[in-house]
Amino acid sequence: MASFVSNVMTEKELADELKLLGRNEPQEGEGKQEQKWGDVVRSLLPRRRKGKGYGQAKVSGREKKITACVRRRLPVFAWAPHYDWKRQFLSDIIIGISLGSVIAPKALGHGLLAQVTPIQGLYTAFFGMLLYTFLGVNPWLSMSTGALQSMMFGQALLQLQSSFGSIDKVSLDALLVFNVGLITLFLGLARADKLFNLMSPAAISAFTVGAAFLIMASQLPYFTGIHETKSTWGGFPLTVIDLVAHIEEWNWADFGLGITSVVFLLASKQITKQVKRRWGYTIPDFGPLVLVILSIVVSVQLDLASKGVKVIGAQANGFPKPQLSFSHGANVFGSAFVTALPVAIINFILTLSVSTGIFTMYQVDFAEQEQKKDQIERQASAPAGPRILDRNQETFTLAIVNLVGSCFGAILGTSSFSGSSLLANYKPRSLLPNFFGAVLILVIMTSLGGVIAPLPKVTLGAIIIVALLRLIDFRSLKETYKVSTEDTAVWLLTFVLTFVSSVQIGVYVAIVVSIAQLVWKAFQANVVELGRLGTTGIYRNLDNFQQAERVQQCVILRIDSAFNFANAQKICEKMLEIVQCQQVAAPAAVILVFDSINTIDLPSMRALCWFASECRKQDKEVVYSGVKAGVRRTLGKASKLPEFKEELLFDDSSWFLDLDDCVRCMETKLYTKGRGRASIEVV
């Protein structure tokens, strides 16, 4: 619009406004009623806000909330209006086709790993990428299947099947996936995305490495042609020992094809790296897709099935029919819920971990791109995409993917590391490549079910094993060892127990070790004695600073750990031990530095009162420095309780904001109740 409506409109302005309203010229007398027509036009057009055009109409608070909610739960409405069709559409199609080509063969292998038909892995990849296009917030993340998650799901499915053998596996699969989605939905509603960092990074890293070995062990029988039924327990060592003990039963055609497939995939990876290193071009690794095609051709030409090579067999063609298999009674549903609980928790943690890592890369690249643009260009064509990762929305998306997938025979949906890595290399600015990848998956699963029937299972096993090599990374152990002995012990314990047992035990160990580590840290009681550096007002730890000297008639103690019901009594006992060891002549003062204490609870108050009473018996007064406003408010509320009415802990005359003021007050013996009092205004 040429101009905004002013208080008094000119004839030209009125003509322009009427033209927009569908009228060519003002009627006779309209130009004389400028103020009136201005009011009419202004009432029909959106109100102007300073610095914004008519597209930024003033809306009510309720409309703003509804719009914000829709954009948060359906992020496609946030980025789609700003999508640059001319610059991004063609490249997104190419990226999407590459994404589908990389994910499809791995999804087939993950379906086999999940103890179901390979085509069900494609179902998961299709629904995962399709739904993530509309619900996802991370342009560089792809949601489909994962090796580790499929392994966990497969073992959980076998466990459930052993308890309810009369129910077909397809129904149990749907029930298990539905429960995983339901648990994930509960985690989203409970805002558990804020708590996923409570899992120890060392435990997660060790579990991932140990589980990678277990997944490899589950694929080794395909290389030997024996032990088609895999053991749920035993771990990597026992599986390898068992296979070597039956070496005379090996099918050497399977073994030769498997080794050849592994070599081919490794060579394909190296070629991709060399192309990027020498010519600077980033190309997707089409090795798995080419290997699948070549394996099908070789299998048909040489009739490998007649030589004992296991093939995946004919797969269902067409779009999967919706089916609800939840009418098996409360007993079956309850068992499925309990079985799905650890799988859902680990899947939730791993998905958010991958999403957070990939999004960090996206933010760095986004910042670099914006630095290359000036202010005007950024306003004109800013790349579409979020600035902050909404983990809660990622959790809801994961839940919806599994809930919808359970109705179509899909397996466990999760973040795809290989697909996300490909997107990170190509750096798209929207989620449209996921959509085109889903279209390619749809074409494959609806028209090529019979074509992939001769595909040897060992080929899919080789694809999974090579993909897992990136997870077997002991550099995290080396880095952890250099920094923390405690985290190193956690890493080794989790890895060993996962490596020699099973994925289920590894999951429980990772959770229990993380909780135990948090509890152990909560019980730590660290108290240090401070001394003054010369005549300055600086106080440091006596154990770390030789120049620091004790202040006469004062014992200065600082709490260097959490202070709560778990360790309060232990901390107070340790402080009393230090006070008694110093043998400071009475009268004296014990100064507690509370700078690091943010909260205090009732058991901690009782412990402090006990400590103060023990010090008074030795004619030593306890005063407090750096008590924060929140702690003071809590102490003020507690002072009204009968048991604390006579305690000096709740007398603000014993509180000092500055440690040096407190020490000098004690030194000059000017401290009396009320006279040495410092200001206690909230800081």
Image (spheres, grey):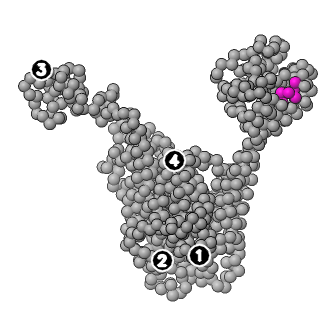
Local crowd size for mark 4, using a 10 Å CA cut-off: few (<14), some (14–19), many (≥20): many
User: Nearer the N terminus, badge 2 or badge 4?
Assistant: 4
41 vs 501: above or below: above
Quarter of the image for the N terminus: give it.
top left
| Most common SS among magenta residues | helix
Q: For mark 1, give the secondary structure.
A: loop
Q: Nearer the viewer, residue 382 or 501?
A: 501
> Label 4 belongs to which residue?
392
Three-letter amino acid code of the residue under disc 4: Asn
In magenta, the rendered stretch is 611-616
In the picture, measured across the screen, residue 78 lies left or right of residue 592, that is left
Three-letter amino acid code of the residue under disc 1: Gly
Q: Furthest residue to the bottom?
A: 306
Q: Position of residue 30 (x, y in %)?
A: 11, 24
> Label 3 belongs to which residue?
32
> Label 1 belongs to which residue?
165
Q: Position of residue 312 (x, y in %)?
A: 50, 77
- C-alpha separation, residue under disc 2 versus residue under disc 1: 29 Å
User: Nearer the N terminus, badge 1 or badge 4?
Assistant: 1
Q: For mark 3, give the secondary structure.
A: loop
In the picture, measured across the screen, residue 288 lies left or right of residue 613, that is left
Of badges 1 and 4, nearer the viewer stands 1
Kindly tell me whether residue 115 is visible in this rendering. yes
268 magenta-colored: no
Residue drawn at (64%, 23%) of the image: 683
Q: Nearer the viewer, residue 311 or 607?
A: 607
Q: Furthest residue to the left?
A: 28
Of badges 1 and 3, nearer the viewer stands 1
User: Nearer the N terminus, badge 2 or badge 1?
Assistant: 1
Q: Quadrant of residue 580?
A: top right
- C-alpha separation, residue under disc 3 versus residue under disc 2: 84 Å
